[in-house]
Every structure is written in C-alpha cells, then in structure tokens.
C-alpha cells in the first residue's frame, strides 16, 4: 500500500457540538490514512468513532463544528468543498452503510426502486438499464430471487436481507470508499459474517477502500487489515489487525482482556481501570 | 427448582398463529445457572417470558419452587422470581428516581424497613447512597443496569431471569456487570436463567447451556463441552464457528437451518 497515495488522508480532525450545556468535543485531533484496504475503527460508545466517519461526508449536522489540518480524498480537499461538490462525492465516490436498515430504507418505496434510484442519480442510465443493474446487484449480494425481492417493501424483508439491500444500494454507483458504521451489529452472528463476506468480496474485487466502524473488537480483528483504536475522541493506537493480541496501549489491552472468551475460565473478568492520562491531548504519530 | 415439560407458546390465532416455542422441556436445580442461547426469533426470550408470567398464551406444565404454575400466580411466586431486562434505557421509568424505582416492589409486597432495604440493595450492586435520588437520565448505561439488578434483588428472590442483561452495554461495562451477577449469585445462592445471543457470555456465567432454534431445543450442553467445542448438532457447531470471528472460508460452509 505504501507506493500508492492514500485514498483518504486525515490530519488533526476535530468535531465539536454546541449544546446548551456548553461545547462537547466528540473528536479531538484524529489522524489516519485509508488506502485500498479494510480499516477498522474500534471504540466504546462515546469514543467519537461514528462522528469521525460522519465528518468525512459532512454529515455531522448543523450544530457541529468540524475542523482539520487536512482532509483529502483523492486529491479533493473535503474541508472547503462546496455543498454541490459534497453532493457529487456522497454516494458516488464515498458511500455510507448505516447500522439499521429499518431506519435507513424508505418505507414507502419498493426495495428495487430505491436501489435503482441510487443508480439513476449517479449515472445517466435509462430506467430499464437501472433495473437490470439493480437485479444484477441484488443477485451479487446473494439474494436468491432478485425479481421477487425487487418488488418488496422494506418491512417485508428480514434484517439480514435489509442490510444486504443497503449494501447493494451503496455499491451500485461503484464508490471508491465505503464507510460502514456498525453495518452488522443488529444481525445474528452467522448472518453478520455472511454480510461481511459480501462486503469483503466487493472490496477485493473492485479495489475499494473500506472504513469499518465497530464496537466489536474481536470481529474487527478478524475482518480488517488495520485497526484504529479510539477513546475519548482520540486515537489510542493504530495497528495491524493480526497484531491486536500484542497491542501496546493499556486501553487496547484492557479492551481485549475484559471480553469473555469462549474457551475462557470461570474467574472474574478483568475490569478496565481508566487512566485519566488517556484523555490528555497527545501528539499522535501515523 | 424449575421444571418445565412440553412448553409451547403460541402468538396469534387461526391461520396467523405462530408457535414461538414448540415443546420445550427443562429442569434446573437450585443454585444452578442455566443459559439459553439462540439467534433472533429462536424463542429463547419467550421461554423466559412464559416462566415469568409476562406471556400468557402457553400450554404445558411448569413448576417453580414447588408451585405449579397456572395463568394466575401467587404473590409469593412474583417475589421469588425476578427479571432483569436487556435495555436499561427502556426498563427504568424516566420520571422516577432510583429511590422510587427501588421502593415500588417493596410497596407491592408490603415489606417494611424500606429505607434499610434500599440502601442495602444499592450497596450490593456497587452504587453508593449518593445514587438514591437520581433520575435514570443522570446515570450511565452500566449504572442503570445495576439499578435494574438492585430492583430485582431487593425482594430477596431465589430465581433471577436474565434477558440479555449485557447486550446493550460496552464490553468494559459488560465485564463489570457479569462479575457483579456472578458475585451476587454466590452470595445469595441464586438460581439464574440467562438468555443471550452471545455464546461466550453464556459460557462465562452458566454451567449448563441449551441451544435453541426456531422454537425448539437443538441441544443441551455443559460448559466444558462448549469450551472444548464438543457439539452433537451441526447447528451448534456453525454457531460456535461464527462466534469465533470472521473467516472467509468458514462463511462459505454455512448452511441455513
């Protein structure tokens, strides 16, 4: 990955929210690069992992303030991008998969129409072409009867199928980078892995970049190439996924050790002792 | 302590009837911790809700602590059997203080010495008296789940039904709650039935584990067999493989059950 410039490069990203109780700093100086790889962002609730993902697409809402020294996607400076430029990037070049398909799909449109719409918006294809592509895409995300599913409404499909539909919709414009925010957390484990396998294959075949945001450390460790560990709006460490067991940062170690293991003993689980020093603003190396 | 024979739970009537649990039998001894695992829709929570009396449309025989359960149960049953729910955000009344929440079961069961019992319950779940007059929105998720556990324990029950008690919590908080549940069980000699989709969590807290799928018991196994991956049924084996994390090749071998 070293020879190519990264797809997305972020330096000193900060996200804060103005609330009646004062300013909340959700992300406090985050640096990372993403290439054509699977990058995991792991953290507990409130670590800033989701806001980091949203800030890339300018989806943090009107009450937020986003600043960065650098936020560059394929040569485009995302910091000063106009709304028009952002609209052209969103969905077409960078797309986002959310956690729960029940809230992310339009309940009054059939599944097929929604996917076709995503294609029509980003290409100059005709309706019949869009329909063809949609059926092909549904088939690729392993939906057995695409013709039938095309006509279903979101409430008529299961959670696992809904998430595959979301993935089909996000992949149909052929983006360069996908941001997946807890894409499988609402699913059963076997279905979760099946959905990840689809995402995995697509990323490999098309050479896409994937940012996989999750609270599930063991899943990220087994699925991603590299992992960013976040706490209190900052990155504690960035490491190769297969080196998680040898993590150096005490926070990462604590996260690993407080998980019950399938082959573990009956002794009490390790309890995390939070070091206030983890919250100190630190200069972070890439 | 708990004996269930041929429990069937049906939702809906006529052609819309769905059997969520189909002929489940189990026996749990006093002081034992029994786990029910399965994927969504397997009927694991429904078994718990039928035992607790929250679901009325069941058939079969259930006996808890010597009492044969009918539709109507004695106040004593409701004191002895308590439940902790999954979502600590939904299971506590947002406009009741911790004090109100803990006092309500005491009022219902006409127990005296409320002040002392409330303080003791708070202490047992690791929260000090300073939490007594807080509202749920002033508590973190883990603290809320501790309050829900305190509310269950304040009646000094013998059986606690745990429905995914840690799945809405961060892993570091989950570890604290699991440790707490384990300690309380040993201190009070409680009998647990715990429902979870997470095999590792169930394996940590329970000695005996039943795997459910589509309303049926697929198999029952000991904690040792779970740890060593000794299973009789393909469904369980697949669940075990899937619980170990992502493996591209393993995914291709998955079959639908």
Image (tube, rainbow, N blue to C red):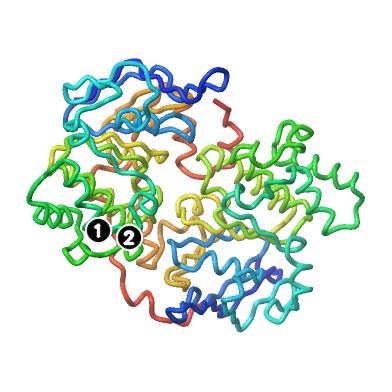
Q: Give the percent coordinates (x, y) of residue B149.
A: 25, 48
Residue that mark 2 sits on:
B136
Q: Nearer the viewer, residue A226 or B126?
A: B126
User: What is the CA distance from the residue labelled 1 to the residue labelled 2?
Assistant: 7 Å
Residue that mark 1 sits on:
B98
Q: Give the percent coordinates (x, y) of residue B222.
A: 29, 28
- Quadrant of res A88: bottom right
Residue at 48% of width from left, 24% of height from top?
B234
Using a 10 Å C-alpha cutoff, classify the residue at mark 1 as few (fewer than 14 neighbours), some (14 to 19) or many (20 or more). Answer: many
In the rendered structure, find residue A143 and report the number of the disc placed on it: none
Helix, strand or loop at disc 1?
A: helix
- Up-down: is A160 above or below B232? below
Earlier-in-chain disc, 1 versus 2:
1
Query: Would you say residue B224 is visible in this rendering?
Result: no
Residue at 77% of width from left, 51% of height from top?
A172
- Quadrant of res A67: bottom right
- Quadrant of res A45: bottom left
Residue at 69% of width from left, 60% of height from top?
A95
Q: Label 2 near label 1: C-beta < 8 Å?
A: yes
């Amino acid at each position: 990955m070293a020879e190519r410039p990264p797809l997305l490069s972020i330096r000193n990203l900060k996200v804060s929210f103005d609330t009646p109780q004062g300013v909340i700093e959700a992300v406090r100086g985050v640096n990372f690069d993403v290439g054509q790889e699977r990058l995991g962002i792991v953290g507990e609730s409130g670590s800033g992992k989701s806001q980091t993902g949203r800030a890339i697409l300018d989806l943090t809402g009107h009450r937020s303030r986003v600043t960065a020294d650098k936020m560059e996607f394929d040569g485009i400076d995302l910091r000063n991008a106009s709304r028009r430029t952002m609209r052209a990037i969103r969905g077409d070049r960078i797309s986002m998969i959310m956690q729960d398909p029940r809230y992310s799909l339009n309940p009054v449109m059939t599944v097929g129409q929604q996917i076709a719409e995503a294609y029509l918006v980003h290409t100059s294809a005709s309706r019949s072409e869009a329909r063809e592509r949609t059926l092909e895409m549904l088939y690729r995300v392993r939906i057995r009867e695409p013709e039938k599913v095309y006509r279903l409404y979101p409430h008529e499909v299961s959670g696992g199928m809904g998430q595959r539909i979301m993935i089909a919709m996000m992949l149909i414009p052929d983006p360069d980078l996908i941001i997946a925010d807890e894409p499988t957390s609402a699913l059963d484990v076997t279905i979760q892995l099946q959905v990840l396998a689809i995402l995995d294959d697509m990323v490999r075949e098309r050479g896409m970049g994937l940012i996989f945001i999750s609270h599930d450390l063991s899943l990220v460790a087994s699925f991603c190439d590299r992992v960013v560990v976040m706490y209190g709006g900052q990155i504690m460490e960035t490491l190769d996924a297969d080196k998680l067991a040898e993590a150096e940062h005490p926070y990462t170690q604590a996260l690993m050790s407080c998980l019950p293991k399938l082959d573990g003993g009956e002794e009490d689980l390790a309890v995390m002792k939070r070091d206030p020093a983890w919250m100190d603003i630190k200069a972070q190396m890439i | 302590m708990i004996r269930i024979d041929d429990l069937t739970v049906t939702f809906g009537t006529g052609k819309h009837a769905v059997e969520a649990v189909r002929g489940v039998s189990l026996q749990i001894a006093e002081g034992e911790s029994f786990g029910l695992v399965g994927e969504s829709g397997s009927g694991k929570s429904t078994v718990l809700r039928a035992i607790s009396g929250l679901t009325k449309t069941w058939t079969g025989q259930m006996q808890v602590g010597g009492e044969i359960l009918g539709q109507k149960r004695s106040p004593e049953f409701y004191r002895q059997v308590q439940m902790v729910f999954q979502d600590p955000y939904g299971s506590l009344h947002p406009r009741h203080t911790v004090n109100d929440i803990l006092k309500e079961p005491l009022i219902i069961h006409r127990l005296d010495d409320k002040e002392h019992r409330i303080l003791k319950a708070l202490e047992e779940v690791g929260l000090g008296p300073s939490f007594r007059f807080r509202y749920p929105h002033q508590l973190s998720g883990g603290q809320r789940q501790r309050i829900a556990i305190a509310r269950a324990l304040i009646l000094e029950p013998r059986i606690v039904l745990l429905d995914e008690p840690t799945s809405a919590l961060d892993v570091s908080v989950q570890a604290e709650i699991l440790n707490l549940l384990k300690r309380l069980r040993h201190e009070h000699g409680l009998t647990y039935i715990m429902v979870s989709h997470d095999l590792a969590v169930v394996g940590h807290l329970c000695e005996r584990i039943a795997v459910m799928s589509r309303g049926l018991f697929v198999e029952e196994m000991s904690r040792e067999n779970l740890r060593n991956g000794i299973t009789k049924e393909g469904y369980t084996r697949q669940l075990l493989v899937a619980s170990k994390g992502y493996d591209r090749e393993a995914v291709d071998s998955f079959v639908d059950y």
